[in-house]
């Protein structure tokens, strides 16, 4: 499995030359935004997803192995005629296995490890997909004549996704957000085709790795 740091570096290595390509008709300020804001967030979300996924499967595997071994150890410590040294060792292993399984269950429930990795997967995929749509002028950006014209819509969408990640994460740890709630949680759209608008409606994404508060950056066209 790719490590957290290598996956982050790999994503930057793959996308940095695309941002610097001459075919991408953007100003230096706009390219700087792509590097320091969008690409940095996408790489951080990818790293958070890999880290959360490893933690989830580590806990799950430990629980499965411990829960499988616990009945066997219990049967040996109760019914088997073992030498004194072995009997003591089996009883100690039984207690340790029970504690390990209980601790893993408590950690997974307390930190919502399974939900965390799924939310990280969603936000990482959404940020990367949004960037590729913009770079290729496809989907909701197909109506724009150039990357320069589409840039403001793309930047607004990236900032909307970032703000929503923070708000939804802080709210959803208590209870699920209503899908049709109004106000600041209402889906935001920008000028595009109907297909594009449907694709750019903000989804309920959560990711702890982008929860730092950053000042929104909107370069002028």
Image (cartoon, rainbow, N blue to C red):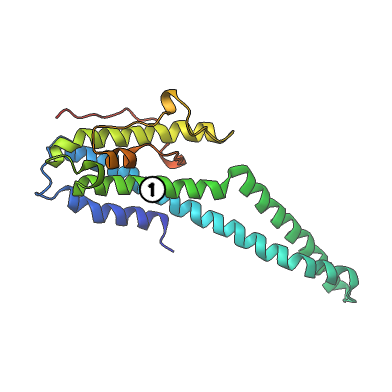
Residue occupying image coordinates x 38% and y 36%: 202
Instruction: Assign the N terminus to one quadrant of the image.
Output: bottom left
Tell whether 161 sits left or right of 168: left
- Mark 1, other Cα within 10 Å: few <14 / some 14–19 / many ≥20: many
x, y percent for residue 52: 49, 51
Q: Nearer the viewer, residue 132 or 16?
A: 132
Q: Is residue 212 visible?
A: no
Tell whether 8 sits left or right of 52: left
Residue occupying image coordinates x 19% and y 49%: 136
Tell whether 50 sits left or right of 7: right
Tell whether 115 sits left or right of 154: right
Q: Which residue is mark 1?
A: 124
Vertical relation: 121 (above or below) 77: above
Quadrant hosting residue 80: bottom right
Residue occupying image coordinates x 26% and y 29%: 217
Vertical relation: 145 (above or below) 63: above
Residue occupying image coordinates x 49% and y 34%: 179
Instruction: Assign the C terminus to one quadrant of the image.
Output: top left
Q: Nearer the viewer, residue 54 or 179?
A: 179
In this view, the residue farthest toward the top is 183
Q: Is residue 2 visible?
A: yes
The kind of secondary structure element at disc 1 is helix
x, y percent for residue 197: 30, 37
x, y percent for residue 139: 25, 46
């Amino acid at each position: 499995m790719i490590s957290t740091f290598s996956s982050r570096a790999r994503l930057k290595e793959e996308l940095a030359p695309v941002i610097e390509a001459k075919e991408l008709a953007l100003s230096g300020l706009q390219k700087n935004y792509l590097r320091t804001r969008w690409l940095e967030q996408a790489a951080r979300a990818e790293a958070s997803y890999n880290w959360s996924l490893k933690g989830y499967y580590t806990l799950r595997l430990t629980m499965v192995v411990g829960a499988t071994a616990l009945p066997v150890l219990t049967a040996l410590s109760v019914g088997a005629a073992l030498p004194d040294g072995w009997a003591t060792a089996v009883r100690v292993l039984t207690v340790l296995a029970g504690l390990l399984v209980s601790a893993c269950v408590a950690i997974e429930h307390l930190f919502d490890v399974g939900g965390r990795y799924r939310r990280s997967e969603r936000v990482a995929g959404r940020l990367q997909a949004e960037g590729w749509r913009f770079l290729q002028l496809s989907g909701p950006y197909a109506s724009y004549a150039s990357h320069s014209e589409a840039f403001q819509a793309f930047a607004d969408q990236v900032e909307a996704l970032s703000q929503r990640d923070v708000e939804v994460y802080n709210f959803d740890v208590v209870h699920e957000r209503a899908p049709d709630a109004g106000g600041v949680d209402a889906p935001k759209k920008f000028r595009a085709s109907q297909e594009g608008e449907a694709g750019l409606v903000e989804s309920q994404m959560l990711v702890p790795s982008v929860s730092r508060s950053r000042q929104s950056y909107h370069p002028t066209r």
